[in-house]
Image: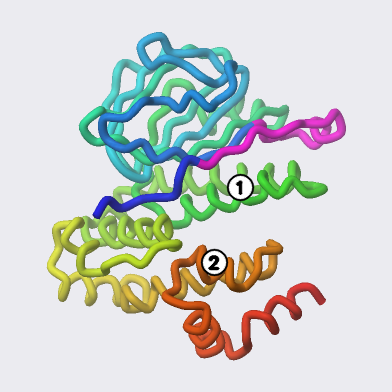
């Protein structure tokens, strides 16, 4: 079984003059799973974002690109051609030529967010980020993946104040990346990185039913050791953690969408509507309908 994977998911946003006065605005956010031997990048992107890897491009904004799976290459005006692998973040700067792409034989999973404004200009001018240090080793991080997923959700909902919400997420992503990059040597134990990768696999497959033993095999670790280390690292057994992710996602769908409860059970790949009802009631203490009613009150 190939793990990943959400489908490609992105949003390009409109920015008002009032939003610009906040000091930081988000233009785009998204996720692309690129399977091996597939076209890159997707032709669905607007002309000013689409590029051919052999030609590269110049953006008018900053971007953060985070690779959670796979391998590739990156180079720019200030960075010679560099190998990229999972657990690395790429900082892109406005007005600077760059190019990147996954390796054909591996593909990669790519999260990205594009933004601009006086605040980020000041951060760059003060040396917190620099074109001389564009590729950062941050490790495989569930927290980063969740921040990008939250940004995608907020962008797609496009509610009032969403630009300010997204600006806060950008600061959180950037702060997390800078902190992880400074401390990655203290947190780079192979077992910890494998557990982080397992957690991300679970997040990216929350709408499926996955085989926990197969995850351990894919990560090159025995199932018994995987279960023990996973519990030590997270406080949960792997299967229990995956169930908690499904419950968390179900709560979000109940509170934030108009999807019917049957649709939610189907989206999360429960074996039946009735099983979803009993599973939710057992884990949360109330029925899905009661949870939805409480959230809307």
Residue name at image x 54 percent, y 30 percent: 63
Q: Position of residue 182 (x, y in %)?
A: 40, 44
Give the left or right position of residue 32, taking residue 23 as reference: left
Residue name at image x 24 percent, y 55 percent: 1
Tell me how far mark 1 sits from mark 2, CA to CA: 15 Å
Residue 158's place in the image compared with 209, above or below, is above
Q: Nearer the viewer, residue 243 or 226?
A: 243
Give the left or right position of residue 193, taking residue 202 as reference: left
Residue 283's place in the image compared with 62, above or below, is below
Name the residue carrying label 2: 249
Going from the N terminus, do you reach mark 1 or mark 2 first? 1
Give the left or right position of residue 88, taking residue 262 as reference: left
Q: Quadrant of residue 218?
A: bottom left
**Quadrant location, the C terminus:** bottom right
Q: Position of residue 247 (x, y in %)?
A: 52, 74
Please provide the residue range marked out in magenta.
9-27
Q: Nearer the viewer, residue 153 or 263?
A: 263
| Element assignment for label 2 | helix
Q: Which mark is residue 151?
A: 1
Q: Position of residue 13 (x, y in %)?
A: 70, 34
* Identity of the residue furthest to the top in this view: 55
Q: Nearer the viewer, residue 192 or 34?
A: 34
How crowded is the residue under tag 1: few (<14 C-alpha within 10 Å), some, or many (20+)?
many
Residue name at image x 33 percent, y 76 percent: 239
Residue 16 within the magenta-colored segment of the rendering: yes
| Element assignment for label 1 | helix
Q: Position of residue 54 (x, y in %)?
A: 35, 11
Task: State the colouring used for the structure image.
Answer: rainbow
Residue name at image x 65 percent, y 33 percent: 12
**Disc number lying in front (1 or 2):** 2
């Amino acid at each position: 079984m190939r793990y990943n994977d959400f489908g490609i998911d992105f949003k390009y946003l409109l920015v008002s003059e009032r939003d610009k006065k906040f000091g930081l605005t988000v233009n785009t956010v998204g996720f692309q799973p690129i399977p091996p031997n597939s076209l890159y990048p997707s032709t669905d992107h607007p002309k000013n974002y689409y590029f051919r890897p052999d030609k590269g491009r110049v953006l008018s904004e900053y971007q953060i690109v985070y690779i959670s799976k796979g391998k590739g290459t990156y180079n720019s005006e200030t960075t010679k051609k560099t190998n990229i692998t999972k657990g690395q973040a790429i900082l892109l700067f406005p007005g600077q030529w760059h190019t990147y792409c996954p390796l054909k034989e591996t593909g990669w999973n790519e999260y990205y967010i594009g933004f601009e404004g006086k605040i980020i200009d000041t951060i760059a001018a003060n040396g917190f980020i620099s074109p001389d240090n564009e590729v950062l080793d941050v490790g495989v991080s569930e927290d980063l993946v969740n921040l990008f997923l939250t940004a995608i959700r907020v962008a797609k909902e496009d509610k009032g104040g969403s630009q300010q919400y997204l600006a806060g997420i950008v600061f959180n992503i950037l702060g997390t990346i800078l902190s992880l990059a400074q401390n990655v040597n203290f947190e780079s134990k192979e077992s910890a990185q494998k557990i982080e990768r397992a957690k991300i696999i679970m997040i990216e497959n929350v709408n499926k039913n996955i085989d926990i033993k197969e995850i351990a095999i894919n990560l090159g670790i025995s199932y018994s050791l995987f279960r023990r280390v996973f519990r030590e690292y997270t406080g949960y057994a792997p299967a229990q953690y995956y169930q908690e992710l499904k419950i968390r996602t179900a709560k979000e769908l109940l509170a934030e969408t108009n999807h019917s409860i049957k649709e939610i059970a189907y989206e999360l790949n429960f074996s039946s509507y009735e099983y979803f009802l009993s599973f939710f009631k057992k884990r949360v203490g109330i029925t899905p309908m009661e949870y939805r009613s409480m959230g809307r009150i």
